[in-house]
Amino acid sequence: LVHELGHALAARALKVRVGTITIHGLGGQVEHARTTPGRQLAISLAGPGAGLTLGMLTLGVAAAIPAVTQSDVGSSIVADLLFVNIVWSVFNLLPLFPLDGGNALRSGLALFTREVDAWRVTAGVGLLIGAGLVFLGWTSNEIFLLYIAGSATVTNWRILQELPAR
């Protein structure tokens, strides 16, 4: 929820109209009006930025108040908050669609090149990274990673197939 609020608040701060925020089992999505590549770049990075900020605040509280982690419950809560906010935020910055890193790379490239080329490069990079993550998930028997990476790989493949020919 903090992650999606980061996207929504960044969009509003940049005067981009925000629609609905949808939360689902694997994250969420903020619908907003189409905007410039620079603004989209900032909006894409704001979600992981919000998660990383909350993760760092969690670390700070745990360090400043050691009693927080002295119970099993407190230690478990801190560990879960760190995982969700730091690990997932960093993972979400990988440059593959539909992750924020993919949207950020596409937006950054679109500042300097045609939008279709930005989509093509990002989906190509995403396809390679996704395939690598599928291999990692398969060889390490990490079913969840295999599922996420497989889904992202298919998404990037489909994007490449749907782009107009050069």
Image (cartoon, rainbow, N blue to C red):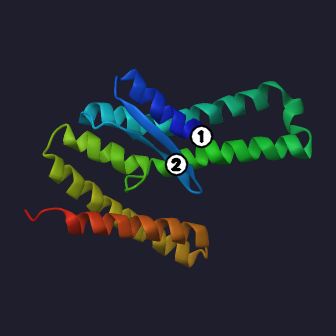
Pick the front one: 32 or 46: 32
Above or below, 88 against 66 in this view is below
Task: Classify residue 44 by image quadrant.
Answer: top left
Left or right: where 31 falls relative to 141: left
Under tag 2, what secondary structure? strand
Residue 133 x/y as whole percent: 47, 67
Residue 88 x/y as whole percent: 57, 49
> Disc 1 vs disc 2: Cβ atoms closer than 8 Å?
yes
Left or right: where 64 falls relative to 99: right
Residue 7 x/y as whole percent: 46, 35
Task: Decide which of tag 1 and tag 2 comes sooner along the chain.
Answer: 1
- Quadrant position of the N terminus in the picture: top right
Q: At label 2, which amino acid type do we have?
A: Gly
Q: Which residue is mark 2?
A: 28
Which class describes the residues within 10 Å of circle 2: few (<14), some (14-19), or many (20+)?
few
Left or right: where 135 falls relative to 142: left
- Quadrant position of the C terminus in the picture: bottom left
Q: Residue at x 85, y 30 (%)?
A: 66
Left or right: where 53 falls relative to 118: right
Q: Residue at x 40, y 47 (%)?
A: 101
Above or below, 86 against 119 in this view is above
Instruction: Give the residue furthest to the right.
Output: 71
Q: Which residue is mark 1?
A: 1
